[in-house]
């Protein structure tokens, strides 16, 4: 996916500059900022191109590593501000643990490290000197943090211990690096909590999962399914894993959006995290870990982007409104520019993220293309007619709808339109996703749905060997099918329903499909 990605370079086209500006500077008429790949025709190349042309990332000289540009970081900061405030309401506190892990600690939990071993990067030298003991770089922080939980937790008064850190992690070994989706270093938050009882741990798992649903559905306008992972797909070393699962209709692949794990007492046993209860009895803590990462941003691009570029949901867009002057020949250019500045001032004071583009060496058409590529939800155009009529023209990025609104009613109208864009992006994504969901009962129906790039809901006997068999039988160039999750919202399972793959009695409905 990394090959063939180049930033679009401006190219000149016919000029319609106003005469004053034409004398001062050469005005770039270039409107050919468009993408060279179409989303429906070559999704992989389109995605690689749009994240660069939309100024979200830049490729780096180490494969699988990407520069996150301000357009990306502002989205991350918006989600971070929401999530951080919510977990603080739950009395979860932020901390920071080192990036480096000693091999002895990393290998304490065998199942866990086996799950991550191929991806662990190691520091083996200092300058020209080989290190006696190699040091791992964290792929996740359970083994970094839990030796200290053992030290800090002694009695029931030390519980619950609820910590979160915002950090980076490194996972090295993989094929097909893809910006945001599969990268060797990424940003995330990881929460690690310890409780006296399983009931408290179970309750928190679902509270955090609901926050992840809100990030996807309320902020990124992406529909997700909340559910539980199979034993085969759960977090290595954990008791059970819950997730929010998104789906990319263009590729017919599910994508794990975020995970909230109940670790049970397994890590407590390995790291001796014990406490004394009120009665003086010894017990082991119950633990959770949960995380979401910059992958969320890649899912947003894949779901909403189009052939003009990014499409940003207003709640997370760095700029919600861009104001562009449209001066015609002999127009009152100063009056138009002043009206643009006044519009920015009015909307900024009302709490919107708004900027104007007053650059004189770019034509209005070029600016339209540029800000469409970056996905800004709303464009305001101000020309001589608008100035005379005390109005502005408003153009939506999601559906190109145009409307003239009076300056006197600007704030209320912009607020309403941005809210409609947020809602319609979610509804459009949900409609597309729902069309891809297919309920099947038999293996033949399953295979047909899989080749049609569907997200498949099938009755399953919940046996690990059967899941492994499905993986083996569906392996091909596009990758094998696997369980995505068992949704909490279960359709009725009529008595006598058989598993689609084994013919044994089915225990539940589970989503299956290919995935990222």
Image (tube, rainbow, N blue to C red):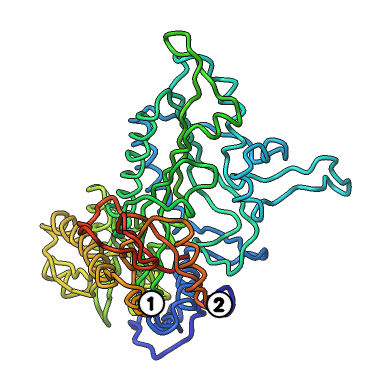
Residue found 34% across the figure and 42% down from its top = 82
Q: Earlier in the sequence, mark 2 or mark 1?
A: 2
Which label was assigned to residue 321? none
Q: Residue furthest bottom?
A: 14
Q: Give how far apart the Cα atoms at labels 2 and 1 are.
A: 38 Å
Observer-nearest of 50 and 241: 241
Residue 491 position within the rendered picture, expressed as x and y whole percent measured from the top left: 22, 57
Observer-nearest of 281 and 365: 281
Does the CB distance between marks 2 and 1 fall below 8 Å? no
Residue found 15% across the figure and 57% down from its top = 416
Q: Residues within 10 Å of mark 2 (few under 14, many from 20)?
A: few
Q: Is residue 104 left or right of residue 423?
A: right
Q: Is residue 141 left or right of residue 107?
A: left
Residue 482 lies in quadrant: bottom left
Q: Residues within 10 Å of mark 1 (few under 14, many from 20)?
A: some
Query: Disc 1 designates what residue?
Result: 447
Residue found 20% across the figure and 57% down from its top = 492
Residue 426 position within the rendered picture, expressed as x and y whole percent measured from the top left: 25, 62
Query: Disc 2 designates what residue?
Result: 6
Instruction: State whether residue 32 is above or below residue 185.
Output: below
Which corner quadrant holds the N terminus? Answer: bottom right
Q: Is residue 481 left or right of residue 435?
A: right
């Amino acid at each position: 996916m990394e090959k063939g990605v180049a930033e679009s370079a401006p190219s000149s086209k016919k000029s319609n500059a106003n005469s004053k500006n034409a004398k001062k500077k050469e005005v770039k008429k270039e409107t050919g900022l468009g993408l060279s790949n179409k989303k429906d025709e070559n999704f992989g190349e389109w995605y690689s191109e749009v994240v660069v042309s939309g100024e979200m990332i830049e490729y780096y000289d180490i494969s699988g590593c990407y520069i996150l540009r301000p357009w990306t970081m502002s989205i991350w900061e918006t989600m971070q501000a929401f999530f951080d405030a919510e977990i603080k309401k739950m009395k979860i506190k932020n901390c920071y643990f080192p990036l480096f892990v000693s091999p002895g600690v990393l290998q304490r939990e065998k199942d866990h490290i086996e799950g991550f071993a191929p991806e662990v990067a190691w520091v083996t030298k200092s300058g020209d000197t080989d290190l006696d003991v190699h040091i791992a770089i964290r792929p996740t922080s359970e083994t970094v943090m839990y030796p200290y939980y053992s030290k800090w937790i002694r009695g029931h008064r030390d519980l619950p211990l609820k910590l979160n850190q915002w950090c980076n992690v490194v996972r090295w070994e993989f094929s097909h690096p893809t910006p945001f989706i599969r990268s060797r270093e990424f940003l995330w938050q990881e929460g690690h909590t310890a409780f006296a009882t399983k009931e408290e741990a179970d309750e928190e798992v679902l509270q955090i999962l609901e926050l992840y649903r809100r990030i996807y559905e309320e902020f990124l306008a992406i529909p997700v399914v909340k559910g539980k992972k199979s034993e085969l797909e759960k977090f290595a070393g954990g008791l059970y894993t819950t997730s929010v699962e998104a789906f990319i209709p263009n590729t017919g692949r599910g994508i794990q959006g975020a995970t909230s794990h109940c670790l049970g007492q397994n890590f407590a046993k390995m790291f001796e995290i014990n406490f004394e209860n009120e009665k003086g009895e010894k017990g082991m803590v119950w633990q959770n870990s949960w995380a979401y990462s910059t992958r969320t941003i890649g899912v947003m691009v894949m779901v909403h982007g189009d052939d003009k570029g990014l499409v940003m949901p207003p709640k997370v867009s760095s700029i919600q409104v861009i104001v562009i002057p449209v001066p015609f020949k002999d127009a009152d250019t100063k009056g138009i520019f002043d009206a643009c500045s006044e519009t920015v001032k009015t909307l900024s004071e009302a709490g919107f993220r708004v900027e104007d583009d007053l650059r004189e060496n770019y034509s209005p058409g070029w600016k339209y293309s540029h800000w469409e590529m970056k996905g800004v939800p709303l464009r305001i155009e101000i020309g001589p007619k608008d100035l005379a009529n005390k109005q502005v023209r408003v153009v939506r990025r999601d559906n190109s709808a145009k409307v003239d609104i009076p300056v006197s009613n600007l704030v209320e109208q912009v607020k309403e339109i941005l809210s409609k864009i947020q809602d319609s992006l979610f509804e459009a994504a949900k409609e597309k996703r729902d069309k891809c969901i297919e309920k099947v009962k038999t293996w033949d129906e399953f295979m047909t749905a899989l080749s049609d790039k569907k997200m498949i809901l099938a009755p399953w006997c919940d046996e690990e060997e059967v899941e492994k068999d499905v993986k083996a039988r569906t392996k091909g160039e596009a990758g094998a099918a696997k369980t995505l999750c068992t949704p909490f919202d279960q359709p009725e399972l009529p008595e006598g329903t058989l598993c689609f793959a084994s013919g044994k009695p089915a225990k539940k409905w589970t989503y299956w499909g290919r995935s990222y």
